Image (cartoon, grey):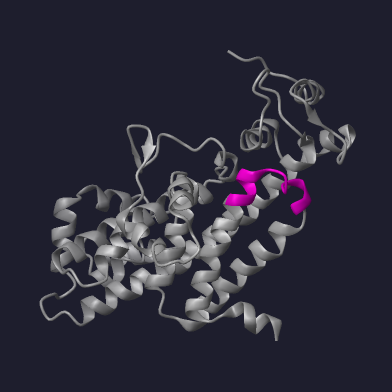
Amino acid sequence: MKNKITIDEQIEHMKSKNIKFQIMSEDDAKNFLSTRTYYFKLKSYAKSFQTMNTCNNYLKLDFAYLVELSTLDAHLRQFIMNLSLSIEHSLKTKLIRDFTNNPNEDGYTIISDFINQYPFILQNIDTKRKDSACADLICKYHPNWPIWAIVEVLSFGDFIKLFRFYYTKYPDSESKKEMDLLWSAKFIRNAAAHNNCLLNSLRHPYVHTHLSKNNKIVPTKALQLEISKIKGLSKNAKKRMLANPVTHDFIATLMLFNHVCTSEAMKRNIYSDLHDLFQNRFLRHQDYFKQDLLLVSSYNFILKIIDFLDSGVYNLSEEQKS
């Protein structure tokens, strides 16, 4: 059991691990730990930096690097939330469009069958009856739901179950790929929604995840197929980068969005935000990380994915130069 330590003791502990305070002073670091974040969360980002093999102390790590990586992580989580909302809307649009064009469904039968398979769904909805923005909708339809109404009240996880249920019964040429990418989107969306750290796992990936098999990450077939279309990515780079669940899930979520979104305006907004995040904000203090080959290679790998998606859709980078 670890003992509680004061902020002064936190600073001394970091110094004992060879974390420097040259860019940001100790006084500024104490203020940051008092007003902007807390030690347990910030210190977790140190896992993404190199250590000395002999004593497990950090190699060329300044406190300011931890601050910057935690800030980039916050920006990344915000982008993931915006991306996830766009994906959720696009998936609902697809589902309702396909149902509307399906002469074999009235909107109630499919939901009755769905609830018979997942009876807890009604309980999940009922918990929102008095404390959510969809309470009026629940009072109107519960428990006899049509598909066009129930999609408005389901959690993202429960909506994924409905999406899979519908397209298992009525498969189309695109749904298999979408279903293969959905769990990755759900995982990283939930992590972002709960403010879980993401960029603290670049050097030491999470082991216990939805993709884990014998403590190793197994990339989805759909993602491997999409990645294979991108030129300039070596086989070793793809294997190495997709072995990290956060990298895997982020790329899978981008691919899912690119695949399912049919709104030109939505795609323009998302890709514009993505470019601004990776080509502007991520590079603001690039000198902090330029000597770390893992961090640089991870960034360059994802940047190639972004360039591929951009060039295949709207070539936003060229528009921004003009």
Q: What is the span of residues highlighted in magenta in the rendered image?
A: 286-297
Residue that appears at 62% across and 69% down: 275
* Whole-percent x, y for residue 120 in the image: 24, 47
Instruction: Judge whether residue 96 is colored magenta.
Output: no
Residue that appears at 38% across and 65% down: 136
User: Residue 36, can we see it?
Assistant: no
User: Residue 170, can we see it?
Assistant: yes
* Whole-percent x, y for residue 9 in the image: 79, 20
Count of marks, rendered view: 0
Q: Quadrant of residue 40?
A: top right
Q: Is residue 229 above or below residue 124?
A: below
Q: Is residue 126 above or below residue 47?
A: below
Instruction: Judge whether residue 294 is colored magenta.
Output: yes
Residue that appears at 57% across and 75% down: 269
Relative to residue 152, is residue 315 drawn left or right? right
Relative to residue 97, is residue 132 drawn left or right? right
Residue that appears at 47% across and 58% down: 251
* Whole-percent x, y for residue 160 in the image: 31, 58
* Whole-percent x, y for residue 302 in the image: 55, 58
Locate the N terminus by quadrant.
Answer: top right
Q: Is residue 104 above or below residue 251?
A: below
Relative to residue 82, is residue 74 drawn left or right? right
Seen from the viewer's position, the closer of residues 304 and 256 is 304
